Amino acid sequence: MFQFSLWRGLVLLAFVAVLTAALVNAWKLRQATYQIAAASAEIRNLRNELGFLTVDDRELVHVKRIKTLDRLTWKWRIFLPAGYSPAFSYSLNDIKREGLPERQSCWFETPYGIETGPTLNLKTPGKSLAEPKEFTFTVAIRHDPQIGWMLVQGGFPNEQSMSSPITEATTWIEHNPGLATAVTGGPDTASFGVDEPIPLLRLRVSRERDDGSSYLLVNDPVNGLVLWMENREMQKSGRS
């Protein structure tokens, strides 16, 4: 009887030891899970602040906005898949809340250099990317004492910079009226198909009433700036 009770006691102690070890391991695992989640969130926040892209599908276009301190400077980190032929277009008027207006100017890379103009000029061969490319693209509105207001872009291609005079009414730049701004790419990376135009920036200027107050209708075509990127090789008709 004594031996039987001792055996039961040993079994019970072994069971308690195993159960305790399992509970301790479960608690440690849970704590480790929380720590990993917290570390992952912190890493994600740091990546967002530094403008790192999250590229899950290398067949898509990925865009992320990088914060700037200047109200007339916008910056993005962009990933383009192989075969993409990027063209950047902009317009300064007839800007609606949705859709794209008729382009006023565009620029794209060809085997002979950069071509600019009011159309994509599909007769000129484009320069498609031989391999995926990730780069920082910046657009800014700057004032030149001799030329006046200019739209300046940098980062494409190969960190080059280009500028175009803004010949439209520039009152909204100088006097900073009410603006409705939509910039593609926020805290998280935005992804797009290679065959769709990507509006990077949509800046709409409020209209002014007689009493000095401003208003902006939902889809009222107004002045401002809209900038978009598209795959020139996909534009066989229509928007060319």
Image: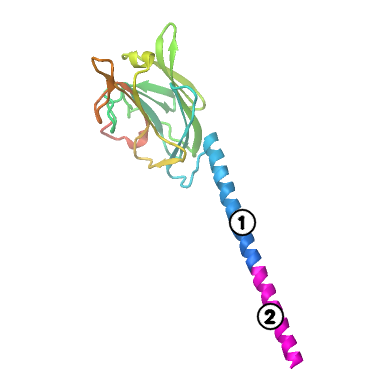
Residue 111 in the image: state x and y as whole percent. 44, 28
Residue found 65% across the figure and 65% down from its top: 24
Viewport quadrant of the C terminus: top left
Q: Residue furthest bottom?
A: 1
Residue found 56% across the figure and 38% down from its top: 46
Residue 49 in the image: state x and y as whole percent. 53, 35
Between 221 and 198, the residue placed more toward the observer is 221
Look at mark 1 in the image and give the residue it sits on.
31
Look at mark 2 in the image and give the residue it sits on.
12
Secondary structure of the residue carrying tag 1 is: helix
Whether residue 221 is visible, yes or no, is: yes
Residue found 76% across the figure and 91% down from its top: 2
Whether residue 170 is visible, yes or no, is: no
Whether 116 is among the magenta residues is no
Q: Earlier in the sequence, mark 2 or mark 1?
A: 2
Residue 124 in the image: state x and y as whole percent. 36, 27
Instruction: Give the magenta range.
Output: 1-22
Magenta segment's dominant SS is: helix
Q: Is residue 69 above or below residue 195?
A: above
Q: Which numbered mark, 2 or 1, is in the foreground of this view?
A: 2
